[in-house]
Image (cartoon, helix red, strand yellow):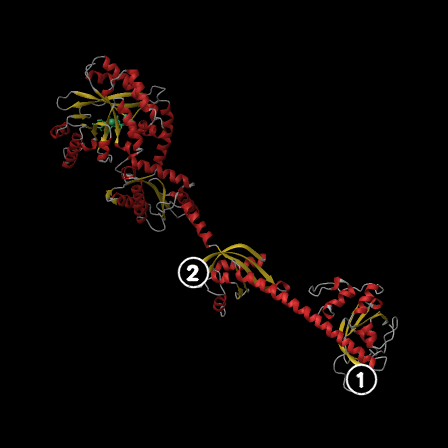
Amino acid sequence: MNQAALFPAKLLQRLFGARSVLAAEPEVEAPRPPSLWDPAFAKAVEELEEGVMLLDGHGRIIVCNGVFRHIFRLPSPPLGQPFVGVFNPGRPDLPPHAATFHEAVLALDLRHESILELSREDGGAERRRLVILAWGEGAERCIFCRFDPPLAHPLPGGRQEHSETALRLERQELLRLNAQLRIENAERRAVAQALRRAESRYRDIFDNAGEGIFQWTPDWRLISANMSFARMLGFATVNALQLSTRDRPFHFCYDKEVALRLMAELESKNSVANFELQVQRSDGSPVWAGMSARRVTGPGGVTNYYEAFIENIAGRKSAEEKLIYQAFHDPLTGLANRALFLDRLRMALRRAQRKPDFSFSVLYLDLDRFKIVNDSLGHSAGDEVLCRAAEIIGSCVRDVDTVARFGGDEFAVLIEGTERSSLAVHVARRIHAALISPVIVRDQEVGIGASIGVVLKAEEYIHAEDILRDADTAMYRAKGRRKLCYCIFGKRMREETMESISLEAELRNGVKNNAFQVVYQPMVNLLDGSVHGFEALLRWTRKTGESMSPTRFIPIAEDTGLINSIGLHTLELVCIQMAAWEQSGGEPFILHVNISGKQLVAKSFARDVARLLKKTGVNADLLRFEITESVLLHDTGACMSGMHQIRDLGVRFCLDDFGTGFSSLSYLRRLPLSSIKIDRSFVSDIETDPQSLAILRNLMSLGDDLGLAVVVEGIERKSQMEFLTAAGCTLAQGFYFHKPLVAEEAGRLIGV
Ligand code: C2E
Ligand code: MG
Ligand code: MG
């Protein structure tokens, strides 16, 4: 019990100043008395309703008030007089030697409360509650005595003599006390009412708060909750929530580990802010919530309970999840995107570092016929093809593997656990076979096809990006060799890539160094054996003296953009040669020049051609530009417009390698073509394979029907020539007749 609790706050305040009214603060220092001679103090004591006296260390009265004097019927304050023998303490629990009240009080260590029978000066006696407080040591010691109003029942046998004056005084006193009680009661009621109002205001806030508010104990018992929280958990009322948790712990966290983390944080930090967790609803389903909570402690810092504000963040969470999903997935197919794929690759590399026997492989795919479907059937059909391809690829791999779309028609697959490298090859074959089978898009059968690059033993790499680079290289290699369904990346390929980089540097200086020459392969009229014309074919003599095939350096020139300057240079060489032959008065002849698609879409191409024609004076009617079908797969619109501009200059077009691409017949009608050149692959086994002959016949008649001149290339043997002649072919080209010839030799054939 603290000292302040023994005395009415009002008394202490008036006795010792505001400093002592600290009943709610237990650790406060004991109040020290103010100067006893202070008139304000004396007045305060005088006004008290209880009888009060203060004794010094020698038991002398130093302060006493009117009520005290009235109790003992003292006519004047007995200040300085020893308070001895005024009454009989009558206390069985006091030390036996305490013969006097003073001794008894001194023997008491601190404070005491007792019922005493007082003997008054006027000879009367009465029972009163005495409250004693002592503080200080020795002569410093002060004793404070408070005599409460007389108790109702006197001690049996006690004397009770009230004089009339005493009765009157008592009555007045009672009336005064009564009035005071009424005031106090009224005050108390007003305070209670204010409290109730404040309570109800706070309860309103608690009940109607948009946020959930609740309290729970360290052993997971729900103490209180508001409506928002009950609703968040799927209960119609707070009562329903309370009932459901009455006989069991209130495990509101959906995830046990999160619950442990939450409690650990609350215990260590006393509070948590914006703690995200999933709370468990009444039907067992989780819902995302953000919580701020604090630990409420009791004496000794022991946790009493926790209280929390909580709000439903399911909407924000799902928006966040959606954003994250979008950042890592392809919106069209729902597959992983490049970022997610790279992340998985990095994880696989880390795993391989930890587990030396772990192996994985990567496939890089490019659809072969996507472009043509997209251009001919429209973009939404193209989207359908991509989605079908994604499904097909997904169906060829296991759930643990990752399939990604990198944009356009490029896909990648990460196959984990390929300790047997045949597994990756097996998957590549399976995907290739599945993609070759036609799919139905917009009521049309479409064969997608794919070229696949494979990196086996990807765990030997350090950087994920390098794996993709090499898989991409292998994919290009597979695309270049049409009959290959996949290509495995090997060290040789890397060397070749490096070589192509050095080739590029050399190619750049080729035009300046006059490293290019043109050779001319005649096209023969089978009816009379005459030379119908020539195909100009480019040759590059390298610094080493080696002559490199255009099939090797043209793709590099195309990839690096060098094709524009090399192509124009070639055309210039050809036009100069043509003009020279024309001037020499030889037989009229047709001249075919191979043009890359990249040249065709270049804005300045038609202008450059016009300039060359003008400069050399060549007859544009005799000039044919050969383009391959694959040219049309990329940027068809730009190709078409380029072709029409050239056609306006008088130059005509020949579709080269006809039959190997994927031209739809509608293209043939729309292109400004004058001839087609049937690919040599249809001629190679014409004598033995009746199907090849049948296809060849059909291609020839298709050209005829479209009013196009038809040239068949790649005739190497007499027998092939005979078959072709029998099939009605008139124009042919091949080693059987002539190999590509230098200009001088070619000129001789036309009588120059
Ligand atoms: P292409 O336009 O189809 O040219 C025909 C290719 O077949 C030539 O190879 C030619 O030498 C070869 N050839 C002709 N008759 C026969 C035969 O009976 N048997 C065999 N096995 N081959 C035969 P070349 O000169 O190596 O050219 C290859 C390709 O390089 C050309 O195929 C063409 O696409 C491209 N090319 C050549 N010169 C140029 C050029 O100046 N510009 C562009 N953009 N490409 C060119
Ligand atoms: Mg050609
Ligand atoms: Mg050809």
Q: Quadrant of residue 670?
A: top left
Answer whether residue 705 is visible to the viewer in this image.
yes
Would you say 128 lies left or right of 435 here? right
Q: Position of residue 582 (x, y in %)?
A: 23, 15
Q: How busy is the neighbourhood of tag 1: few (under 14 within 10 Å), some, or many (20 plus)?
A: few
**Label 2 environment density (alpha carbons within 10 Å; few <14, some 14–19, many ≥20):** few
Q: Residue at x 36, y 19 (%)?
A: 513
The residue that mark 1 highlights is 160
Q: Which mark is residue 659?
A: none
| Residue type, label 2 | Ser
Instruction: Name the kind of residue labelled 1 in the image.
Output: Gln
**Vertical comparison of 403 with 562: above or below:** below
Q: Which mark is residue 285?
A: 2
Which quarter of the image is occupied by the N terminus? bottom right
Q: Is residue 118 in view?
A: no
- The answer to whether residue 23 is left or right of residue 522 is right
504 or 460: which is nearer to us?
A: 504
In three-dimensional space, the C-alpha distance between marks 2 and 1, rounded to whole angstroms, equals: 80 Å
Residue 283 in the image, given as x and y percentages of width and height: 42, 63
In-front residue for pair 730/720 = 730
